[in-house]
Amino acid sequence: MRLLENIHNYDLVTFNWCLARKYRQLMIQISRIVSKTADGHLYGMLGVVLVLTGYYTLAALMTATLIAERLMYLTLKNRLRRNRPPQAIPGFESIVTPSDQFSFPSGHTSAAFLFAGLISAAWPTAALALYPWAILVGCSRVMLGVHFPTDTIAGALLGYIFSVLGLYTLQVMQLSII
């Protein structure tokens, strides 16, 4: 339990540091925009574009890995039941209303890293834009007050691991991503 207490204390210090920045209002405005890019609708649109342009394997891989990742994400979130910052910090209110009750792991961050990993495997130069975007998604969730930093770190790992597992599955099946 001491390890969990230390992690929670780290989260509180880091969380408070983020929220005490000089340009907090500007960062909140940017965070709202960045966070919305990871709400999910863009992933669906990307899947449609991939199908319409003939990238059937990549579209199928994205769909299958997203389903598998979401199942693991929901299992972790509902088993671990970590409170979000407003429930864990007396008097704190988040900037946005989260879509669910629990905090760990960050679903926005997980999906962002999943898609960054898969698209970067197909088009490696895309990694230069997609991974920084995925990192910003995680940071935005902290800035909006709906996640602690370790929630987003866990989300990033979850998404990345599922992208690697999906790509490995294609390799085993001897299929090309594009």
Image (cartoon, rainbow, N blue to C red):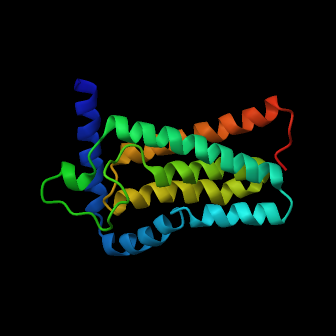
Residue in the image at 23% along x and 24% along y: 1
Total tally of numbered discs in the picture: 0
Q: Is residue 55 left or right of residue 31?
A: right
Please say if 137 is above or below 118.
below
In x, y percent, where is residue 153?
44, 43
Residue at the farthest left position: 90
Q: Is residue 70 left or right of residue 14?
A: right
In front here: 119 or 47? 47
In front here: 63 or 159? 63
Q: Quadrant of residue 50?
A: bottom right
Residue in the image at 57% along x and 60% along y: 133
In front here: 171 or 123? 171
In x, y percent, where is residue 64?
67, 44
Residue in the image at 35% along x and 35% along y: 79
Residue in the image at 74% along x and 33% along y: 169
In x, y percent, where is residue 150?
37, 42
In x, y percent, where is residue 37?
54, 67
In front here: 20 or 93? 93
Q: Is residue 65 left or right of residue 148?
A: right
